[in-house]
Amino acid sequence: MGATAHSAIERSAIKKVSVRLVPFVALMFFVNYLDRTAVSFAEPNGMGQDLALTAAQFGFASGVFFIGYIILEVPSNMALHKFGARRWLARIMVSWGVVALLFTWVQNSEQLYTLRFLLGVAEAGFFPGAILFLSQWVPSRHRTKVLGLFYLAQPLTTVIGAPLAGWFINQHGLFGLEGWRVMFLGVSIPAILLGVVAWFYLIDKPADAKWLTRDEKEWLTAELAAENAGKTGADEKSNHGKEALKAAFTNSRVWILALIYFGFIYGLYALAFFLPTIINGFQEQFGTTFSVMDKALITAIPYLPAAIVLYFWSRHATRHGVHTWHIAGPAVVGGISIPLALYMGSPAATVAVITVTACAIFAALPVFWSVPSQFLTGAAAAAGIALINTAGNVAGFAAGYVTGWLKDFSGAYYLPLFLVGAFMLMSAALMLWLAKRSKDHGAHHGRPLAEVR
């Protein structure tokens, strides 16, 4: 078969994967992120007052989700590798949808803590499982593009989800419920329905895809097998549970990437959980008044440009190769911009600077997730990706609790947002160091990060 025919098969196969799988998994991610951040819309719109929550209590409720997630994340991803993404991701979605539904009837802070913890338990493994699933469908040179399309769901969750949450909250009195309870009801049901559909729609590997031609199946299978040869986890022995865990947990690059990801996710969730509350404070700070829907729309503003920047940043990395600055550059921009937001003299200027921060965070994340699969495969990839994402979940817990606690302690958001900036600058420094280390010592430390330069 000639080069032209191979190229046509490659284009056709990648296009079919991008059309058949990526939008559906992205929709799952959309609902996933909306359910876990719905509490941020509920708090300033009645829940905080009804449950008598302090900023620290709300921060703890926001963050305790991640404790349950952390405990079960690595085991969940190992189970996904064993049982297949179709079954496991469907199971996760139905489980978290049922727990999310129960938020409709929460009565006090203790019940809120319990349900947030259980939501984390139910959701454990979804995000790293989705990353692993998509990474197993396309060769590395196409992975940044595919992960970028998948990651669009996260900023778009707020672009679409914030006004949607505002609409639900405005349905106060429906079924005799407060508006914020109606919102929890409305955003939980799609998870259950999507989980049922996922059981029948998803496919675990290219060889089983009836919508691929024989040539496309053979090309994808051969490309992925050739690419995985020589990676950590490629040998049969290391694909068993204990060996896979050892391969991932003893790889220094996995731990460095985990710390880099910690900084990004600390910034992401500090914004996600507290931006609606900060916007709610504009009335006191600037003497402005906004309706529930106004606040929802303002919350969505930073995320639409972030989605656009994410798309073009990922596209550039796909076309020109992943460079260190694709990840470190946005970390620097985000680290500097987020504390500056508090020194702006108007709501518009504040939101503009926060938009820069959101663009920086979302530009880097899909590019970042193309890196682990460059040196991990099989069960070791399942364990390594889950370990890296566990660091993100630690950051998610810390961002919620520490931001709320520091705000109560200091009386303002200056100190907690300076801390956010410091963690993002840490991510930039570690990414630069990792790239230099891989370049200088790759021959002595296994397979180097070939595309990060």
Image: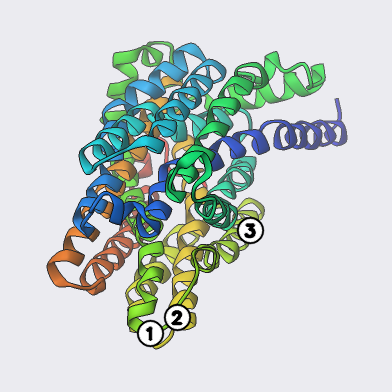
Q: Residue 87 has which mark?
A: none
Disc 3 on helix, strand or loop? helix
Image position, residue 414 (x, y; %): 24, 74
- Quadrant hosting residue 376: top left
Query: Mark 2 and mark 1: span between their CA atoms?
Result: 7 Å
Residue type beneath disc 2:
Pro
173 and 311: which is toward the camera:
173
What residue lies at 45% left-to-right and 58% top-to-bottom?
A: 327
Query: Is residue 3 in sight in this rendering?
Result: yes
Label whose residue precedes the other's in the sequence (2 or 3): 3
Residue type beneath disc 3:
His
- Quadrant hosting residue 221: top right
**From the viewer's perspective, is the residue at label 1 or at label 3 nearer?**
1
Q: Residue furthest left?
A: 409
What residue lies at 85% left-to-right and 25% top-to-bottom?
A: 1
Image position, residue 381 (x, y; %): 43, 28
Residue named by callout 3: 316
Labels 2 & 1 near each other (Cβ < 8 A): yes
Query: Mark 2 and mark 3: span between their CA atoms?
Result: 32 Å
Q: Residue 286 has which mark?
A: 1
* Label 2 crowd bin: few (<14), some (14–19), many (20+), radius 10 Å: some
Disc 1 on helix, strand or loop? helix
* Label 3 crowd bin: few (<14), some (14–19), many (20+), radius 10 Å: some
Q: In this view, does 75 lie to the left or right of 54?
A: right
Disc 2 on helix, strand or loop? helix
Query: Mark 1 and mark 3: span between their CA atoms?
Result: 40 Å
Query: Is residue 32 in sight in this rendering?
Result: no
